[in-house]
Amino acid sequence: MTWRGSSLLVAGLLLAGTLTACGGGAQSASTAFDANNCQGGTLDVLNQDDAASHLDPARLYTSGGGNIPSLLFRTLTTRTRKAGADGAKVAPDLATDTGEPNADATVWTYHLRDGLKFEDGTAITAQDVKYGIERGFAAELPGGAPYLHDWLVGAQNYPGPYKDPNGIAAIETPDAKTIVFHLNSPHGDFPYLATATQFAPVPKAQDKGADYEKHPISSGPYKIESYDKGKSMVLVRNTNWSRAVDPNRLACPDRIEATYGLDPAVINQRLTTGTGKDGDAVTTDTDLGPSELAQLDNNPDLAKRVAKGGFPYTYYIAFDNTKAPFNDIRVRQALSYAIDRTSVVNAAGGSSLAYPATTFLPDNKNMGYQAFDFFPAGKNGDPAKAKQLLAEAGFSNGITITLAHRSADFNQDGPKVATAVQDAFQKAGITVKLQSIDSDSYTTTVSNPATQPQASVEGWGADWPSGGPFIIPIFDGRQYLAGGGNFNTAHFNDPKVNADIDAINKITDPDQAAQRWGQVDSEIMKQAPLVPLFHTTQLRLYGKNVKNAFVSDWTGVYDLSQVSVK
Amino acid sequence: MTAPSEARPGFRVFAGRFRTDRAAVFGAVVAGLLVLLAVFAPVLTAIEGQDIASFHSDLVDSARGGVPLGPLGGISGQHWLGVEPQTGRDLFARIAQGAQISLLVAVCATVVQVFLGVTVGLAAGLGSKLVDTVLTRLADIALAFPVIIFSLALLTIVPDAFPRPLLLALVIGVLGWGGTARISRAQTLSLRTRDFVAAARLSGAGGFRIARREILPGLAAPVITYAALLLPTNVITEAALSFVGVGVRPPTSSWGQMLSTATTWFRSDVMYVLIPAVMVFLTVLSFTLVGEGVRVALDPRTTRLTRKAG
């Protein structure tokens, strides 16, 4: 009698949940954090998913080197481990500085620090870094960011070191400590790109191809003791690493134990209660749920254990601007006026986890954010104005569109947000038919112009905190990829914007570039190529014994290389 | 004179007995109200002045994740059962639609189960030894099937275009006929040796006619009794399947689906869990009480007991 068992189970779980609802917990962390005296203890990581679908530096697609990957893989540069806007800057990691460009930012030179070693004690050389980058080109190891293919001279078709052991000529290693990159066009953002895990050294002698991810050789403060993919991972100290050769990572805990595959409600419940080992726990992938949000006001103990940050991310409605009815700017404007950003933000988890977007760039200084709202829809949309614009465009009886969304809500592009859009558009005479696309194939479907739905809910995050990787893939007309892997779903192509992008790429001063990206954002959004919905905020709990859990503007979450449980 | 065990009480006798069973009457009243709620869901929602789909972002606390404003999940004159967290959609409208889905699926599934079960049972009971063996083994297999797991598999592979409530009814129905088949076969076997069946056969009646005119009426009592208990089982199965996310698709609402969403809300908005849970509970309880009442009222042995007592 399966049905009887399962219904009893459901009832029992609900009851148990209600009974344990009154969890709280006393504070026990007493002494202040001291970086010089923070070593010791075991940090627990409670996650929904394995932090890496593939724990291979060639296959990771992380922003700034990632959180857990950055404990194992040092890169030429890395994100600055500081709170707030300072944390959105690039810091030298394996290299002695963030890179020496030539006059037009097409040649970048790096020198490695002294005394760098892998976990087995062998020295890290420039050749190891070069080999690591070349692995990222191998078809056997897909998954990394595409920038290097486009940027390095003559590397577009490089098949990787397994098929072509001669390597990439555009990367020179004149000696064991120097590495030089030759780019085919100016890229002031190169130091940001060098934070990616593809810039981590890989010892050629220990490369096992696709199996390398079972035990990647560490260059960071920890090494893998055991790893059960998708379930758990245990990291212990790498004795060949020291703070003397790494000014960025504090590496306080002696041991880090990660558990994957947990339910988000369970993670938050365990962090809230903090019984036993859970007092020393953190999460790298779970934001607060409604239960915790509701408690924040009247539970100061809980409230002070919440790290708040903003990983630059924008959710929006995309549609092909070259196809009817979206080829009429009045229709696109009507959609922008019709949107009810309050209900959309609520669908995304409420105002604590998202804020309304009227720009494409998120509110982040390093991205070049400038505030504007060209089609003021107010808090709840302006259906009257939208109807008027539709009528002017010849659609006085309204229009019907199909809106695709991810089948699940684990990102914020699922049925909840789509239904909220549907409801708001209805009031403006825009009938929305929802099309649910399976989560696994969602990105592939919407990023291929051949299968692209009429309209879709999409999201875009920063590969690094600069306007470039945010704006170029979405709005550069030359980045429209008819064969798939296309993120310019609007099919946007404005020669002036393209020229601006080329001009800004030559700028090596991030502040100057940021200001220009803000102007480009405004230039683009005037044309209403998409409907920005909201930007996200991260609210992450940490255990009651965890210290130094600060948040940078780059990652929006606390940094495992900085936290302490002592 | 016929023995009491062979007495076939007419409807009046049945109703008289049913009425004396207080639990059954309570069940019947509640079940009746639920059926009314389901049938008149659109009308009642219109009287309330709400609809299923409209968002009310002003009725939820955005900063706290979208918890309904006001006590008890935002229950008010405008929103009789409060509003859904995050969206502010009217809960009464969604609960009423949930009642439609729940009862519709359960009733249709029961009809499918009874139809299949009785057909197979009759065929097994009246057929040759080979037919009987094959069909009985089939029924055993059907009984041994883990219904939830198999439904999960079936519901996942069928494309979304297929109407979901109908699919649910079919899947639950097609997988759950084993019990009815067994009961029908047993009853058929005991009836086919009776004199009136032999008489019918001697007077030249064919197999089909015997099944329909002589055996089927004799099956009514046990099958109705069993079906009355199958119905609440099917309510639970539908709720469980919707709970795990293979039931009806949003924006259609169902109780199981609400309970599943509510797992993240139970601490901040208790009513959102309680309301669909109470609805499932009341439905199952009332239909089970009715079913039990029907069983008792139709059971010949009860007759003897009541007669002795009287």
Image (tube, coloured by chain):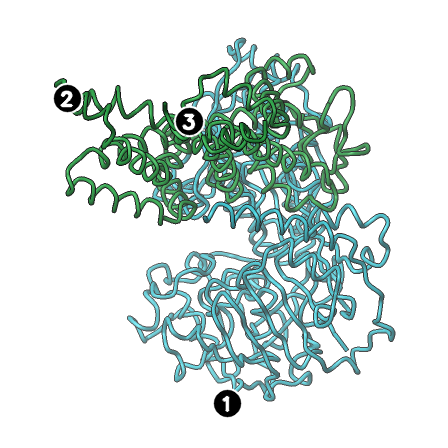
Kindly identify which chain the residue marked by label 1 belongs to: A
Q: Position of residue A14 (x, y in %)?
A: 65, 48
Task: Kindly give the residue lying farthest to the bottom in the view shown.
Answer: A121
Task: Kindly give the residue lying farthest to the front in the view shown.
Answer: B1
Residue B232 lies, with reference to residue A300, above or below; the image says: above
Q: Amino acid at mark 3?
A: Cys
Do badges 2 and 1 share one subunit? no
Which residue is depicted at the point 73% across and 23% down? B79
The span from disc 2 to disc 1 (Cα, nearest Å) is 92 Å
Residue A498 visible: no
Please tell me which residue lies in front, B29 or B42. B29
Please tell me which residue lies in front, A135 or A288. A288
Quadrant including the C terminus of chain A: bottom right
Do badges 3 and 2 share one subunit? yes
Residue A292 visible: yes
Of the image marks 3 and 2, the number of the one nearer the N terminus: 3
User: How many marks do you count on the picture?
Assistant: 3
Q: Position of residue A564 (x, y in %)?
A: 74, 74
Kindly identify which chain the residue marked by label 3 belongs to: B
Q: Amino acid at mark 1?
A: Thr
Q: Is residue A360 rendered to the left or right of residue A350?
A: left
Q: Are the residues tagged 3 and 2 within 8 Å (C-beta)?
A: no
- Rendered shade, chain B: green
Q: Position of residue A122 (x, y in %)?
A: 50, 90
* Among the 4 quarters of the image, the one containing residue A159: bottom left
Q: Are the residues tagged 3 and 1 within 8 Å (C-beta)?
A: no
* Among the 4 quarters of the image, the one containing residue B171: top left
